[in-house]
Image (cartoon, coloured by chain):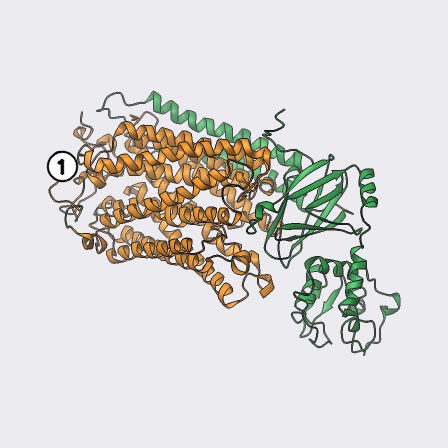
Amino acid sequence: MFSGFPLFPERASTVAGEVDALYFFLVGLSAFFALLIAGMVLFFAIRYRRRSPSERPQAVHGSLALELTWTLIPLGIVVFIFIWSAQVFFGMSRVPKNPMEINVVGKRWMWKVQHLTGQREINELHIPVGVPVKLTLTSEDVIHSFYVPAFRVKKDALPGRYAATWFQATKPGRYHLFCAEYCGTKHSGMIGWVTAMEPAEFQAWLAGGAPGVVPAVAGERLFHELNCVTCHQADAGARGPDLAGLFGSTVRLQGGGTVVADELYIRESIVTPTAKVVEGYQPIMPTFTGMVSEDQILSLLAYIQSLKAPETKAAPPPAAGALDPKAQDVTKP
Amino acid sequence: MSANELPKKNYLNADYGVASWLLTKDHKRIAILYLISVTLMFALGGLFAAAIRLELLTPAGDLVSSEDYNKIFTMHGVIMVFFFLIPTVPAVLGNFLIPIMIGAKDLAFPRINLASWYMYMVGAILTLWAMVSGGLDTGWTFYTPYSTSYSNTQVVIVGVGVFIIGFSSIFTGLNFIVTIHKMRAPGLTWFRLPLFVWAHYATSIIMILGTPVIAVTILMVAAERLLHLGFFDPALGGDPVLFQHLFWFYSHPAVYIMILPAMGVISELVTCFSRKRIFGYPVVALSSLAIAFLGFLVWGHHMFVSGQSTYAGMIFSALSFLVAIPSAIKVFNWAATLYKGSVSWDTPMLYVFGFLGLFTIGGLTGLFLAALGLDVHVHDTYFVVAHFHYIMVGGVVMAYLGGIHFWWPKMTGRMYPEFWGRISAALIFVGFNLTFFPQFLVGYLGMPRRYHAYPDEFQVLNVMSSGGAAVLGLGYFLPLVYLIGSLWYGKVASANPWGAAGLEWQIPSPPPTENFAGQPVVTEEAYAYDTMPQEAFGG
């Protein structure tokens, strides 16, 4: 209708309708109460306007019944809104099964996108409609926030952390991508486009672009280039723990305690290796802070995730000095 | 000259010379010092707002550079929040009125009161110095690790300025609490106190409990910036979200530091200009304490998309909805106070009507932001900007201006011109809505805040907003002119020009330095308009 002057954002994701329903309900509720208050105030102010300077109205002290009415009715209403909005939020927080996964790194002032199929984009994100897409967000520097108004989705990209969010586009189109968390000089330039395409078109796009390197393969290359491989091997005498089957396993730490080897733990072990040393190893690994970018760390993560524990390692000799953490985990009841 | 009719000896002419003002221990003179200071800061913050609205007339960032734009909105926020909104009502109206309202000669600690103004001035001068020597570009929220490891601007100097002005807040709060506890006139029981005093009591509690937290947080930011101690920057082993928890633990309650005293003003005005007792006195009084208490438990609603856990988000959402209840109760009670009253449409009451409308919209749009699933979309957009301006400008500034007009005759002994008062109140109401209502729409469309340049389709709404800002600016400029003019040309005010209840109206305008000739004794509840002598109404 007003193509150059929209009053309402496009609705292009599965959750957008739910968010808008809540919005319209609250707009209606607000209009009702705002008009009620304004009506009361204006009606009384006109009806009981001062007609002579010496007027002296009768005292009215209050009414418990009225106080309870305008306490309990709003209370009931807000409890209702709370439950409704929490449900919508839960739906947004729970990632559906088998999503298409994409890594996104915020860096002043651009969005770097890494598809698991190898495509890389900057300030552009191509996705198929009808498929849940899970984003793993992180930042190279300060806090950014990934915001696509048409999808009603927003999630902060924090340095040193992995945040997950998801959406499922419902109609093809090009939608604004904004950085919503102030990040410095060119904050308003940290924008881009999300292009939602029909699945067939998306496949054509995947096939048409310059063939990229799959993150797991890029990670494997880095693993050799950075000489990680000299220590992290399957040998019993290796200076670093074997990484096969590490991802998702429980790792025993030097000085007691355990940790689940998730993305964050592995990232920390790359940038601050001495923070949590695996039991039985010396804290000899140097830090890789400044040597690897966040998207390279994501590639390394993809590579490590791809390493499955070999069957033969299931029962290692118990006296070995360098136990495979996964194997250790397996020996536990 | 009509000046002859002013009381021969009052606090304004009790002593002459700059030193008599700069070394005064009179709470009324300190209030005037604050009035001048906060007005200057408001004007400065307003100029920054004007620059923002001018830049946003066009989608491209073409008026100033991005660096400058970021500094401009940062200084607008820092000045308006820390140097205007937080101190204005307590430090000007509270300082002037609280001792008089409770029948005391002064606050409990007059020297600490004067020290609080000096703290304010030192903080303000440091901040202004930072502004001209590189500025600040972190936003008033100082989010880490941007503020600690990336910004090349004067984070530490402004931080020290905010740290110091925090003491001015603490001093004021401490003074009010002790004064209200220990110095009430005989017969002035807690439930006979004017609601303005209750509101300031609740505010003072937040000031002394909350302000130390922001002080510590700022010290941590400075330590990380200067000494690279890793509190917040992950590269140094810190946690950036920790900063947000600490910052909002103060800065959300700070919103109630701003609005509670404003609510106190509204209670005084709505009763006087309808000649009615307040509807539901104990409910209105205790809801201030409920707001102060609940206000401390909602800070996490600023972090629904920051990676806080889903369950933490739910708890903060629920508590944020609860804090809406006492505010709603107050609005209903004010509206009900008008029922069967004798409602005057003088300027202060026009500000009350404006406050009730704008604060209601501000409060209701707060529900949108407390609603988890909806906040994800509108968080950090212009919707939030519109919401908090409805509360802080539509609420606090409307109440403050209403209060200034109401107590102007008491403070200066002169009346303001009623005609111009009404014109400016109407201009402010219209200009305000024109400025900020379009921002709700552009926010829901998805325009993020703090954007120097924006997509073309947001332009129409931004132009409307900038146009409204011009009207609003004129509305604020008028009182500055006619109030200052009234000091010379205003009609001399009587002791009680409004026919108002309250101890401050039983002493001359302007009051003598010692406020009361003898010790007043209170025998009645507040707002006993039905038992006031008929002469008070001049009829």
Closest to the observer, B275 or A206: A206
Nearer-the-camera pick, B479 or B175? B479
Q: Quadrant of residue B413?
A: top left
Instruction: Identify the hue of chain A.
Output: green
Q: With A284 as the anchor, is A190 left or right in this view?
A: left
Q: In this view, does B502 lie to the left or right of A233?
A: left
Q: Which residue is under mark 1?
A: B3
Question: The C terminus of chain A appears in which quarter of the rendering?
Answer: bottom right
Q: Residue at x 47, y 38 (%)?
A: B53
Q: Position of residue B118 (x, y in %)?
A: 30, 56
Image-based side of B112 in relation to B368, left or right? left
Give residue A308's quadrant in the image.
bottom right
Q: What x and y, as percent, mark residue B137?
A: 49, 52
Quadrant, the N terminus of chain A: top right
Residue at 35%, 48% (x, y): give it.
Answer: B87
Above or below: residue A326 compared with residue B490: below
Query: Any idea which chain is the orange one in this picture?
Result: B
Is B337 placed left or right of B96 in the picture?
A: right
Image coordinates of residue A280 in percent, x first then y, are 73, 76
Q: Mark 1 lies on which chain?
A: B
